[in-house]
Image (tube, helix red, strand yellow):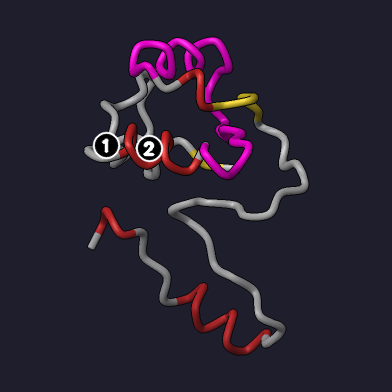
Amino acid sequence: MIDLDGVLDNYSCYTNTIPEIKKGAKEFVKELSKNYELILFTTRPSKQTVEWLQDNKIDKYFKDVTNIKYPAHIYLDDRAIKFEGDYNKTLDEINNFKVYWKE
């Protein structure tokens, strides 16, 4: 499962339009799709997201677009912290978290 905003697009804040595709995203998705079934995860409207994928010619690499968290091998997101069993470490990571595009 791959998140849209901040992973595949040049997200900096939420607007009603999806930002332009990130440099290298097309090649990344194409390469990843060779070994994995890709599902796009987003809270944006499905129709708008599918049109964005089509406009950027990467729709063929995705099996689905959803706002449901399906069981997956990996969740790729720009706002993620990996929980490794230590709540204190996780609290510290949460309290110090910054998305890469705000640094």
Query: Residue drawn 37% across and 16% down?
Result: 57
Query: Residue drawn 49% across and 78% down?
Result: 93
Q: Which mark is residue 22?
A: 1
Q: Is residue 72 magenta?
A: no
Q: CA distance from mark 1 to mark 2?
A: 6 Å
- Percent x, y for residue 35? 57, 44
The picture quadrant where one finds residue 21 is top left
Query: What amino acid is at disc 1?
Result: Lys
Is 37 drawn above or below residue 56 in the view shown?
A: below
Task: Write the start and end of the magenta stretch as one range.
Answer: 34-57
Q: Which mark is residue 79?
A: none
The image shows a total of numbered marks equal to 2
The picture quadrant where one finds residue 46 is top right
Marks 1 and 2 in Cβ contact (< 8 Å): yes
Residue located beneath label 2 in the image = 8
| Picture quarter with the C terminus | bottom left
Question: Which label's residue is closer to the chain start, 1 or 2?
Answer: 2
Q: Element at badge 1?
A: loop
